[in-house]
Image: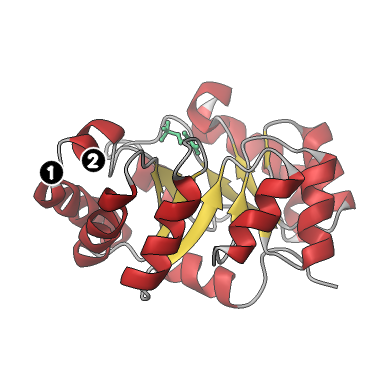
């Protein structure tokens, strides 16, 4: 049985330590964004399925930037899990824990990390066999202090977090140093406004600064 995040996805996230969350309205921007992130040193991205053209953007990235390890985010329905997988997503993520969505990912053996915030949700995720989960929204939930407290009872089960929500260049390094964290993520590296304005150089610099946090 697929244990969600195992094998390549874990090693890619451990190496990258950063997951760039990106929302793309115009698929023409997909390849330049992925290329800018990669040039800046970020090789894992979550393309959030929040626009009509997300699927097309995902296909463009797989075709045009094959070195990018791209996953699909904001997967709220089982049919989106199927579509993302067919379009070439390497993994899926959601902001919350929908049993139908997690079950679909399990049925398709598609690496998937549900989002959650509370001990009860963690136990539900563990019940499905998940060991890597998205902690969302990490900062609003209480930040690093909260993350440490909520991890303590599940550490022995090898639970790992992907904290997202409210992270930025100033607070991300602290999360990264936590042993519970597989990788951190955020939209600050390639925010929608920079993508709309086609500021590829700025995105590359943001990626470079974020990637440098690993060494900090
Ligand atoms: C997500 O989808 O994971 C979040 O939107 C990322 O949160 P952020 O925008 O606060 O970085």
Q: Residue 31 in the image: state x and y as whole percent.
A: 28, 60
Please report the residue visible at 52 percent of the width from the left and 22 percent of the height from the top: 140
Residue under label 2: 195
Quadrant location of the C terminus?
Answer: bottom left
Q: Residues within 10 Å of mark 1 (few under 14, many from 20)?
A: some
Compared to 90, does 187 lie above or below?
Answer: above
Q: Is residue 164 shown left or right of residue 136?
A: left
Please report the residue visible at 37 percent of the width from the left and 63 percent of the height from the top: 61
Farthest residue toward the right? 127
| Residue 59 visible in the picture | yes
The picture quadrant where one finds residue 193 is top left
Q: Residues within 10 Å of mark 2 (few under 14, many from 20)?
A: many
Q: Is residue 203 shown left or right of residue 75?
A: left
Distance of mark 1 from mark 2, alpha carbons?
Answer: 6 Å
Confirm or deny contact between disc 1 and disc 2 (CB under 8 A). yes
Compared to 122, does 157 lie above or below?
Answer: below
Q: Residue 176 in the image: state x and y as whole percent.
A: 43, 51
Q: Which of 92 and 215 is in front in this view?
A: 92
Picture colour scheme: secondary structure
Please report the residue visible at 26 percent of the width from the left and 53 percent of the height from the top: 33
Compared to 208, does 52 lie above or below?
Answer: above
Q: Residue 130 in the image: state x and y as whole percent.
A: 77, 56
Query: Is label 2 in a helix, a strand or a loop?
Result: helix
Q: Residue 115 carries which label?
A: none
Q: Is residue 202 shown left or right of residue 99?
A: left
Q: Is residue 115 shown left or right of residue 109?
A: left
Please report the residue visible at 58 percent of the width from the left and 40 percent of the height from the top: 74
Q: Residue 22 in the image: state x and y as whole percent.
A: 38, 44
Quarter holding ligand 1: top left
Query: Is label 1 in a helix, a strand or a loop?
Result: loop
| Residue 113 visible in the picture | no
Residue under label 1: 199
């Amino acid at each position: 049985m697929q244990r969600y995040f195992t094998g390549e996805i874990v090693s890619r996230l451990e190496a990258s330590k950063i997951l760039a969350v990106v929302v793309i309205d115009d698929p023409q921007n997909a390849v330049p964004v992925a290329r800018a992130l990669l040039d800046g040193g970020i090789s894992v991205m979550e393309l959030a399925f929040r626009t009509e053209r997300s699927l097309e953007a995902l296909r463009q990235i797989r075709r045009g930037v094959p070195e990018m390890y791209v996953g699909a985010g904001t997967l709220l329905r089982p049919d989106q899990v199927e579509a993302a997988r067919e379009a070439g997503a390497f993994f899926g993520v959601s902001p919350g824990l929908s049993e139908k969505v997690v079950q679909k990912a399990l049925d398709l053996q598609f690496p998937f990390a549900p989002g959650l915030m509370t001990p009860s949700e963690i136990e539900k995720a563990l019940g499905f066999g998940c060991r890597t989960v998205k902690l969302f929204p990490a900062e609003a939930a209480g930040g690093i202090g909260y993350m440490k407290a909520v991890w303590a009872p599940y550490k022995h089960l090898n639970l790992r977090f992907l904290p997202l929500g409210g992270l930025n260049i100033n607070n991300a390094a602290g999360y990264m140093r936590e042993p519970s964290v597989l990788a951190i993520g955020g939209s600050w590296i390639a925010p929608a406004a920079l993508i709309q304005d086609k500021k590829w150089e700025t995105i590359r610099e943001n990626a470079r600064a974020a990637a440098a946090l690993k060494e900090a």
